[in-house]
Image (spheres, rainbow, N blue to C red):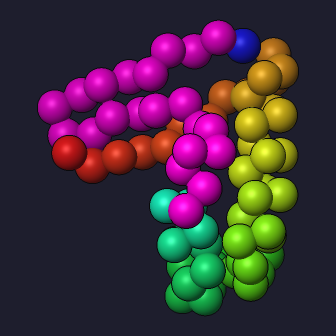
């Protein structure tokens, strides 16, 4: 599915890619972030990379699309 990046006044929605791996790992390694979720925080950069690649794969299909959300 080809979905464009979306740019707004306060946030940007940017297609997920491995370029955002370190940013994603920064919040994914925080146990507090996952306190009420059904899965655990990421214990390594490899955990985050595997999850990110799963989302990228889904975004390349016709069933879903994911973006990173960046505050301006």
- Rendered residue at 46%/32% (across/down): 14
Q: How many marks?
A: 0
The structure residue drawn at horizontal position 75% and vertical position 37%, both measured from the top left corner, is 56
Q: Nearer the viewer, residue 26 or 69?
A: 26
- Residue 21 percent across, percent down from the top left: 60, 56
> In the drawing, does residue 45 fall left or right of residue 23?
right
Q: Quadrant of residue 44?
A: bottom right
- As displayed, is residue 35 above or below residue 9? below
Q: Magenta span has 28?
A: no
Residue at image point 67% right, 28% down = 65
**Quadrant position of the N terminus in the picture:** top right
**Would residue 14 be found to the left or right of residue 56 on screen?**
left
* Placement of 32 over or under 9, stated as above or below: below
Residue 17 sits in which quadrant?
Answer: top right
In which quadrant of the rendered view does residue 38 lie? bottom right
The image shows residue 62, relative to residue 72, as above or below, that is above
- Res 38 visible: no
- Quadrant (top left, top right, bottom left, bottom right) of the C terminus: top left
7 shown above or below 45: above
Residue 46: % across, % down: 79, 68
- Let me know if residue 57 appears in the view: yes
> In this view, which residue lies farthest toward the left?
9
Q: Position of residue 22 (x, y in %)?
A: 55, 62
Residue 20: in magenta span: yes
Q: Which residues are magenta?
A: 2-22
């Amino acid at each position: 599915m080809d979905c464009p990046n979306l740019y707004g006044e306060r946030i940007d929605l940017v297609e997920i890619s491995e370029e955002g791996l370190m940013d994603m790992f920064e919040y994914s390694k925080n146990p507090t972030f996952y306190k009420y979720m059904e899965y655990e925080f990421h214990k390594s950069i490899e955990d985050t990379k595997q999850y990110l690649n799963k989302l990228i794969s889904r975004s390349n299909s016709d069933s879903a699309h994911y973006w990173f959300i960046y505050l301006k």
